[in-house]
Image (cartoon, rainbow, N blue to C red):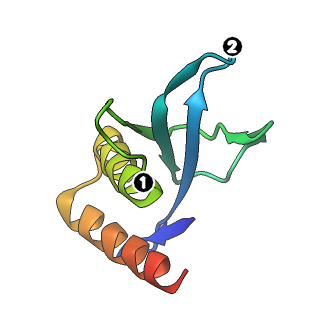
Amino acid sequence: MKLADDQGNTYKAHFYHSSMNNLGVRLWPRTECRLHLDPCVLTTALCTAQPAGVGIAVCSRRDEFRKATGRKIALSRAMLDLGIERATRAKLWEDYLEQVRLG
């Protein structure tokens, strides 16, 4: 997903959903968001472009897994991890919500 800010920067957001680790052990469902400005670098199924802000949302035992909620939490944390300013975050949220609405 591409998200644009007011300065003409285009951020790329990648969302990954899983409930298993690399060894096949079942975990609580989680959503990971990787957010970056550089061109995408795909290795297997994951984008490994650097620098990337990473945000992770993990369900608790009482939560029901909802993809949309996990994406919002993970994207919010990825923006904070990258240190994006508040005004830019607001513009990225506008763009994200519009794409989800139209999607």
Q: Is residue 30 left or right of residue 78?
A: right
The image shows residue 43, relative to residue 37, as above or below, that is: above
Residue farthest toward the left in the current orientation of the protein: 86
Q: Is residue 103 left or right of residue 30?
A: right
Residue at coordinates 41% horizontally, 71% vertically from top-left?
Answer: 96
Q: What residue did someone put label 2 on?
A: 23
Q: What SS does tag 2 mark?
A: loop
The quadrant holding residue 71 is: bottom left
Q: What SS does tag 1 mark?
A: loop
The quadrant holding residue 47 is: top right
* Amino acid bearing label 2: Leu
The image shows residue 54, relative to residue 84, as above or below, that is: above
Residue at coordinates 33% horizontally, 30% vertically from top-left?
Answer: 61
| Numbered-mark total | 2
Near mark 1 (Cα within 10 A), the count class, few <14, some 14-19 or many ≥20, is few
The quadrant holding residue 43 is: top right
Q: Quadrant of the N terminus?
A: bottom right
Q: Give the percent coordinates (x, y) of residue 100.
A: 47, 75
Residue at coordinates 28% horizontally, 65% vertically from top-left?
Answer: 88
Q: CA distance from mark 1 to mark 2?
A: 24 Å
Q: What residue did someone put label 1 on?
A: 66
Residue farthest toward the bottom in the current orientation of the protein: 102
